[in-house]
Amino acid sequence: QVQLVESGGGLVQPGGSLRLSCAASRSIFVFVTMGWYRQAPGKERELVATINSGGVITYAQFVKGRFTISRDNAKNTVSLQMNSLKPEDTAVYYCNAALAYGDYWGQGTQVTVSS
């Protein structure tokens, strides 16, 4: 079993920044891909960004140029730096860690962008 614990969410004004972190309970070398997803009220969960074991990164079109995903293998963490936040970025953000045969999810952290 793997636990993923997110942190760093909160309330920020439009144009502001937040940094989300996801700490895994075991080495992240085993995961094929790690990433961030989000779910806004009344909407389906959607991909934000992923990074695979080789360091290849994928971003959703709506965050390109604003968000940056990174991983620290020594600390077993994956982070999401979010800049130029918009009200439409308001959602619960979830960390995901994928294996070849299944995946794990964190409990989510709320991000609210509002003036």
Image (tube, rainbow, N blue to C red):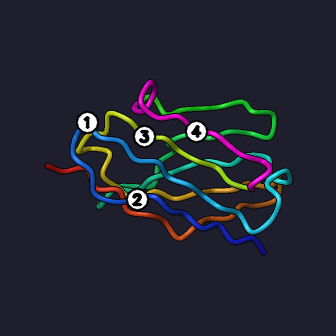
* Residue 30 location (% of width, % of height): 86, 54
Magenta stretch, residue numbers: 62-75
Cα distance in 3D space between marks 3 and 2? 10 Å
* Residue 49 location (% of width, % of height): 55, 40
- Label 1 residue SS: loop
Question: In the image, what residue occupies the spot 27% across and 44% down?
Answer: 88
> Which residue has dot 3 on it?
82
- Label 2 residue SS: loop
Question: In the image, what residue occupies the spot 46% across and 27% down?
Answer: 64
- For marks 1 and 2, the one nearer the N-term is 2
Q: In this view, does 9 lie to the left or right of 56?
A: left
Q: What residue type is labelled 2?
A: Gly
In which image quadrant can residue 40 be found?
Answer: bottom left
- For marks 4 and 1, the one nearer the N-term is 1
- For marks 3 and 2, the one nearer the N-term is 2
Q: In this view, does 54 lie to the left or right of 51?
A: right
Q: In this view, does 11 lie to the left or right of 72?
A: left
Residue that lies at the very extreme toward the left in this rendered image: 115
> Which residue has dot 2 on it?
9
* Residue 27 location (% of width, % of height): 83, 59
Of the numbered discs in the image, which one, if any, rests on residue 15? 1
> Which residue has dot 4 on it?
69
Cα distance in 3D space between marks 4 and 2? 15 Å
Within-10-Å neighbours for mark 1: few <14, some 14–19, many 20+: some
